[in-house]
Image (cartoon, grey):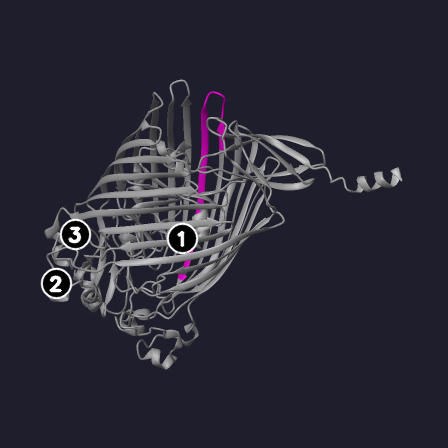
Amino acid sequence: MPMILLFCLWNHVPAQKAVIQGFVTDASDHKFLMGVNIMEKGSSGGTSTDENGYFHLELEPGPQILEFSYLGYETQRKTIVASADEVIEIKIELREKGSLLTTVVVTASKFEKKIGEETVSLDVIRPAMIESQNLTTVDKAIEQDPGVTIIDRQVNIRGGAGYSYGAGSRVQVLLDGLPILQADAGLPNWSSIPLENVGQIEIIKGASSALYGSSAMNGIVNVRTAYPTEQPVTKISVWGGAYVIPKDESGQKSDWWNRTIEELRDHNQHLDRKYLKRPYDAGVSMAHRQKIGKLDLVVGGQAVSNQDQKYFSFERYGRMSTQIRYRRSENFHFGINGFIQGGESGSFFLWNGNEGIDKYLPARITGIPTKTKNLRIALDPYFTFQNEEGNTHKFLSRWYKTDNHSNNDQGNFSNYFYGEYQYQKNWEAVDLTLTTGLVGTRVNVKAPLYDTGDDRLFGRSFAVYIQAEKNIFEKLNLSVGARLENHWITGGNAETKPVIRAGMNYQAAEYTFIRASFGQGFRFPTIAEKFINTSLGKEMGIVPNPSLNSESGISAELGLKQGFRWRNLFAFADVAGFYNRYVNMMEFNPTNDPSVLGDFNFGFQSQNVGNTQILGAEISLQGEIQVSEKMHSSGWIGYTFLIPTYLDWEKVRGESSSAYNVLKYRFRHTFTGSWDFDLSGWSAGLSAKYFSFMENIDRTFISFIPGLLDYRNDRKKDPLHFDPEKKGQYHGDFILDLRAGYTFFVGNNQYKISTIVKNLMNREYSLRPGMIESPLSYTFRLDFRF
């Protein structure tokens, strides 16, 4: 009997659990964090840290994933493998999020630095936002940022650029710190830039030529790839969606894909039956990051096929990317990054009119739409060496090949070679960092798109730069830099230009940062701006201007970042006033000069339009709140106001549609906003954009583009009392997007199902003359994380 009783008791003894205990601290100052949530993935088990940052948690034996989350800090996951009765001691360090002004950035200084200490306006876009909104290319991501607009793939920061017809950029686009603009045209090929393994996108607003050269006179977009952490990460995303039938304000449908080809050819005889496809968007992306001994491996890929709301406007491509870094020692590593993309796309330049389906069909006057097959390859060998005395040596290089084969004699081929040696010295005792470097580039181009009388064109540049940053009393950061740059392209003389910059940032309180900066900008004409010679139909062309001169300018800013923290709420506001001035600004302008027009009746040409200035202000507010362990909300809003004017107004007045002085192709008011809410795996979000009316465009466009005058007249607030001398006489455009999703775990794997609806109100709007934007669309997306 006693033996039977003992046996029964033995069978009711529960299995012994493993014990995980330890401390959670702040990664920067190593202070203990109280109230950190520790959750066991796949179960309801969890705990939180006490006032000493200590936690104690019992787990089932075997592999388990613990998630450490805390308001204002990056969530950290750690895999634990424990045996029964085992006690494991661990220490976790959490890093603050960028919302606490401690996001580490590198673009403005070429070394790691907290964003709150920067002397220039610098914004960061995170992968979570990119994924939640299904932003599959970089341009779609950065236009969520206040003051950033994209017109026909060209990026514009705070009104610094107008509409340049695919040539020339005042914003330098970087991939991991190296230029990725197409060398001959200064045009970013957004779909080529790998986004699946992005760590963060850093956006500088203001002149950055002192560090990054010619194309950076208005700002920087730097896409930084994420490197592997201790735990391997594999992500796969699949999405698919469609567009609804667009309607104008009267309710008239514009579903050209439901019409017969004979009916469509009544609008334009060049239309082809095989392109009658209902608009859709589909794609898949993959990303993997892993440490293998001393080797860091990052691989990714994306395949996309879409047909947007405009006839013949499609894109199909596949891309693979990789980053390989070998850490031979703590102070010496080297590697090679690269990507390859191939595909085809179709586009047209102008709509066929303002009525019904004509808004979504190519104009008769521009002939056959443009179809392009492309191949793009980039390879980036590099090495970094640092010694014990604080000396860092870097060699960075890039070969970027672009091969575009187009109909309409608009193809181009280019090879771009970039090399940079960088030396950096840090004197920790006096908190001083010196960065200097040498840069050399070379480009060779072959293209029927350019008219030079030569089969090939060449260009090259040399530059030397230096920048010093000093911290005084741990409160005041001072920065000063200079660059000397020399440029030359075929058919012109070499030009040398020096530029300088200076900035300061003062930390007045724990979450209060005051900044001021001044910088000079410089931009040398691209090959495309000088030599492009192509038709936009039988009557109109874009013609070369070999005598085009470089432009220069200045950028000044005064700004304040102010943080707020109260219980479970943290927010910060950023307020900035800025002034930009440009000398000999280059913009495409109408021309009727018979000596350059040839067989065209009229055309456009890149010209020096004189001196211009932009006054403005920008305000943004970002915040997050942890309502409970399972409920979290975050959001941001931003507003940018511009006063963009010509200093030589009479020179361009006759070419402008506006009766008053305002730069062409700018939005005086822009607004962006986003809000996300998470509860126990469920999520919902809302995004909004507002563009005021484009007040000034080329007058020639109004007479040349069918229906454009009617479209602009339809946007008048009060047609009966319209006053062309007054501002604010037109309606702007407000666009609303909606999203929802659910995240869950199966074992150690994370899954997310989401739905994204864009242009929720099915608003019909245009961001540049003669081109209508997307109507309401819906997308379903699946994300897998292993």
Tell me the residue that label 1 is attached to.
190
For label 1, count other residues whose C-alpha is less than 10 Å away and answer few (under 14), some (14-19) or many (20+).
some
Q: Is residue 346 magenta?
A: no
Instruction: State left or right for residue 443 relative to residue 59.
Output: left
Q: Is residue 315 visible?
A: no
Give the secondary structure at mark 1. Answer: helix
For label 3, count other residues whose C-alpha is less than 10 Å away and answer few (under 14), some (14-19) or many (20+).
many
Tell me the residue at 54%/28% (across/down).
Answer: 330
Front position among marks 3 and 1: 3
Give the amino acid type for the residue marked by disc 1 in the picture. Trp
Q: Which mark is residue 417?
A: none
Q: Position of residue 427 (x, y in %)?
A: 41, 21
Residues shaded magenta: 384-405
Tell me the residue that label 2 is attached to.
722
Tell me the residue that label 3 is attached to.
662
Using the numbered discs, state the Cα–Cα distance from disc 1 to disc 2 in whole angstroms.
40 Å
Q: Is residue 393 magenta?
A: yes
Tell me the residue at 26%/40% (across/down).
Answer: 522
Q: Position of residue 95 (x, y in %)?
A: 47, 34
